[in-house]
Image (cartoon, rainbow, N blue to C red):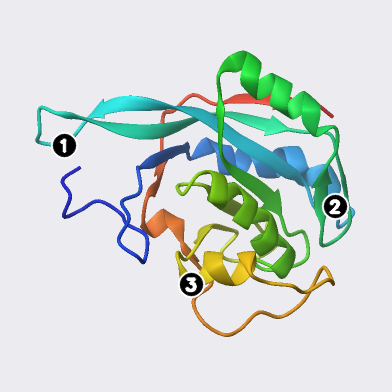
Amino acid sequence: MDEANQSKTERGVPLKTVYLPRACLHRFVAIAKANTMVNKETCGLLLGKMQQKKSHGHKRKEDVFMVSTLLIPKQHATSDTCTMDEEESVMRFTEERGLITLGWIHTHPTQTCFMSSVDLHTHAGFQTMLPESFAVVCAPRQKPNYGIFRLTDPSGLGTILGCQARSAFHPHPEGPIYTDADRGHVTLKDEMSLEIVDLR
């Protein structure tokens, strides 16, 4: 990808392309269906590796991230929250396989596709560790039924990292706190293999 077409943060920092298997979306929704039917969220982690890929029209290669694994951790949930349990088993899994957490995915069984204040705070931790990190929200009963997001940087990430609110659900200042990552550095790709591991 030439530099003119490369995705960047709002402060101009380049973001590596992330390829996400398109099948991941409907496969995750199918896994979450039992919880969705009883209005409980489900969450998963999108894991993968950095690889080199030939740039279109260029001989040089570029570093890209490829999502290869959907990991469903042990978890507990309500209608508007989902929390991973036994995080050490997730760390062990990723370390043993040499995988990186590239993003996360969760359902909104009764709501639309948006990032709640809880989602924003959860995602800030991921994006602080990896600027390319992204969040997928699946809303099986809504249209559109999925969204792929990242925090704006610096404004959104800075707002969330500086937030002192103690209640789980709370307002944030108006402004572009998050944006659509699938119109930027995240590309849905057909014909990519996807391993699904359910630790529940």
Q: Residue at x 45, y 67 (%)?
A: 154
Label 1 near label 3: C-beta < 8 Å? no
Q: Residue at x 62, y 64 (%)?
A: 161
Label 1 near label 2: C-beta < 8 Å? no
Tell me the SS state at disc 2: helix
Tell me the SS state at disc 3: helix
Callout 2: 10 Å neighbours few (<14), some, many (20+)? few
Which residue matches tag 2?
Answer: 37
Front label number (2 vs 1) = 1
Front label number (3 vs 2) = 3
Distance from the alpha carbon under mark 3 to that under mark 1: 32 Å
Amino acid type at image mark 1: His
Label 2 near label 3: C-beta < 8 Å? no
Tell me the SS state at disc 1: loop
Amino acid type at image mark 2: Met
Quadrant in the picture for residue 95: top right
Up-down relation of residue 96 to residue 112 (above or below): above
Q: Nearer the viewer, residue 63 or 139?
A: 63
Q: Earlier in the sequence, mark 3 or mark 1?
A: 1
Distance from the alpha carbon under mark 2 to that under mark 1: 44 Å
Q: Residue at x 14, y 28 (%)?
A: 60
Is residue 121 in view? yes
Callout 3: 10 Å neighbours few (<14), some, many (20+)? some
Which residue matches tag 1?
Answer: 56
Is residue 137 in view? no
